[in-house]
Amino acid sequence: MRTMSEAREGRATGALEEVAVAEGSPIAELVPRVAEGTVVILRNANGSRRAVGLGLGLRTKINANIGTSADASDLEEELRKLDVAVEAGADAVMDLSTGGDLDEIRRAILGASKVPVGSVPIYQAAVRARRSGEGMVHMTADDLLGAVRDHAEDGMDFVTVHCGVTREVAEHCRTSKRLADVVSRGGSFLMEWMSYNHAENPFYERYDDLLDIAAEHDMTLSLGDGLRPGALADANDSAQIAELTVISELVERARDRDVQVIVEGPGHVPLDLVESSVHLEKSLCKGAPFYVLGPLVTDVAPGYDHIGAAIGGAVAAAAGADFLCYVTPAEHLRLPTLDDVREGVYTLRVAAHAADIAKGVPGAREWDDRVSRARKALDWDTVLSMSLDPDRARTIREASLPADDELCTMCGEFCAVRKMTDVRGSEGE
Amino acid sequence: MRTMSEAREGRATGALEEVAVAEGSPIAELVPRVAEGTVVILRNANGSRRAVGLGLGLRTKINANIGTSADASDLEEELRKLDVAVEAGADAVMDLSTGGDLDEIRRAILGASKVPVGSVPIYQAAVRARRSGEGMVHMTADDLLGAVRDHAEDGMDFVTVHCGVTREVAEHCRTSKRLADVVSRGGSFLMEWMSYNHAENPFYERYDDLLDIAAEHDMTLSLGDGLRPGALADANDSAQIAELTVISELVERARDRDVQVIVEGPGHVPLDLVESSVHLEKSLCKGAPFYVLGPLVTDVAPGYDHIGAAIGGAVAAAAGADFLCYVTPAEHLRLPTLDDVREGVYTLRVAAHAADIAKGVPGAREWDDRVSRARKALDWDTVLSMSLDPDRARTIREASLPADDELCTMCGEFCAVRKMTDVRGSEGE
């Protein structure tokens, strides 16, 4: 009962039906999109978490990265981040842990999450290799595929696999004289591995085996951009586009096997290139859902990278990107705290919603109109309770209450909204 | 020695020379742009604050609104906000005070500010009328023009005047069945005044007198959009465009008198309409510098309106907007605190810088490249000290220091940057 196979027979799985309800989309519209691959449904065959749809015509979704590192490997803290992310409205989370007991952490997050969970299994393989004392370059292809299988069997809904970092693509990267070279962890592991072993990327060479694992568990493959630009200067260079070209062929091969697939995108991208980079992915990869990290529209703003990601993410999503990986104020500086996670999710939700209005997702604008009608009526309870983050809106307002509780301390008695109500009243309207 | 008159004779005033140095632009390029009105130089003839240029080819600037209200009228606090805004990098401030002793507050801010100061003199006239017990509808045309003159004589560098809210435009607004009607304070005062007095907007009817005052003091007029949309539903409606059309004619009349003029813009605008609304202003108003408030790309995010403004502002500025009015997290909820002011300025600076890169402002991208080169070299001191807000970046990083101080707690030993340095080293590069 694979989602894509069923859709190609014109049938909806339970997961697809669940997405249709959540999106308010007719099943009859979703089925052909899943069949052609322009919509994917995140849910492992063994999973029981919420099914989430990504792609054409659907609401833009937000992913929150959580997980430990060697410097900060407290499982309880990561489970709290999961809760905070989901409460703030994250549609999915990725466990990117590289510290502590990775199996325990992964299973705990999979067990606790109400939303789809993704991972990057090469981290697991790399940590295992490092802890074994052999070093990452001695990982075998079986080690890498084995990590993917472990995650699939545990019920992972989607996994990032950097299949497009081939030796040829790596050569483009070496010759293109990048400013920031490779900034993807998975990408850098594979670059090192290929360089040391003089061998092809196992995720590329054994892509059919990867498809077998994904097919067996109805797990979505997220084709990672190991060579995503890590500086504006590297955006849209030959290495990035060469990798995307390889990825586009892998998208076709996945679809031929009824494996659902999404494509990951940049990264650091100047604002004037964001829209065209989405259009390129959509045309090259035949409408595969696009999952972007940011993109960040400046390199100079550590501490405010969530802002840069909101700008880039909104423009990307309005142009057709489907899934935004959040960026927190801690990006480039440290592992995020609980507050960073919350701020990151809400910030990217502003971007996603703005994009949904722009691209005409059904129902998106109605929310704004309802809030604005309440604002016009000076109905503060409704404005606050219907706002994106009612707790935050209420806290800010209540920190400085006006003398007249129908108004606010910015304009006070000079409130334009109240004045116009008076004017219209005297006009007899 | 008016800036525009001199430029039309091919000469540069001291203020223009100052801007040329600050922007790294040749005087020979700036002079014709000031002459044609596509660049304005903010500086009252009596002013001694920093001269700031707005317009074609120049860096996108940020304005921070400060000022009291009836509910919060502490001059010292507003002076602290001025300091915070300028330290954070605001290029100009506007004093929008409506509470306390307005003359004292205005003069104190003018005296203390290092950057150009703007105001909305109709607030002063309205407050005077209200305190006199007569009520705002009994203000005379002389009261309104008199407030503008008072501000000009005190050295105000630019003033917002809602000249385009004519009776005909008001009629468009009445018939267009807006969701949020008029949300500009100045606009609502004039709507009430015209409705009660059955008379034309004095700022329109006596526009020549206004030009006399501006000309005498070399004060820039900022033609306010009294009917800017206050909800996405009202964006680009007939009222807004009718007002902009009137404003475009007033731009020509100002230029005919060698008065520098900028145009104010929305407001609440869906992301897909932001770019075209900037293009409309630029074509209709013959390249007059465009000063936008936001625009906010959603109505649902009180508490996060600075995020919506960063998205809308970045896209607007990339399309040609020249001057972004900041929006703080307190927008729609209360008067901003010091922290709100700081957050608002830095947030909009991310937007402005991203736009400057996109529109190719000379030198903009070099900053990013320098930061990225330092990041690539794991040169943390340089990354932090050259970043947008070094204090914030340092504080975030130092809250969670890694075991290896060359790295950070997100990736730790799996740092892609370090790994690639090793890979390239082993490749003999």
Image (cartoon, coloured by chain):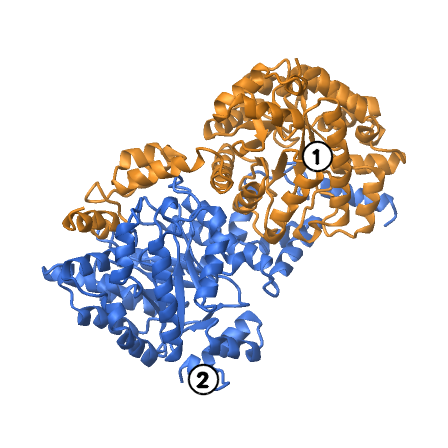
Chain colours: A blue, B orange
In the depicted structure, whether residue A93 falls above or below residue B23: below
Of A323 and B34, which appears nearest the observer? Answer: B34
How many dots with numbers? 2
The Cα atoms of the two marked residues, 1 and 2, are separated by: 58 Å
Instruction: Identify the residue position indicated by label 2 in the image.
Output: A6
**Residue A228 visible in the snapshot:** no
Give, as a three-letter code, the residue at label 1: Gly
Asked whether, in this view, residue B73 is left or right of residue A195, the answer is right
In the depicted structure, whether residue A180 falls above or below residue B190: below
Disc 1: CA contacts within 10 A as few (<14), some (14-19) or many (>=20) = many
Find the residue positioned furthest to the left. Answer: A133
Placement of the N terminus of chain B among the 4 image quadrants = top right
In the depicted structure, whether residue A382 falls above or below residue B375: below
The location of residue A195, given as percent across then percent down, is 18, 57
Give, as a three-letter code, the residue at label 2: Glu
Element type at mark 1: loop
The location of residue B117, given as percent across then percent down, is 60, 23
Instruction: Identify the residue position indicated by label 1 in the image.
Output: B224
The location of residue B320, given as percent across then percent down, is 58, 40
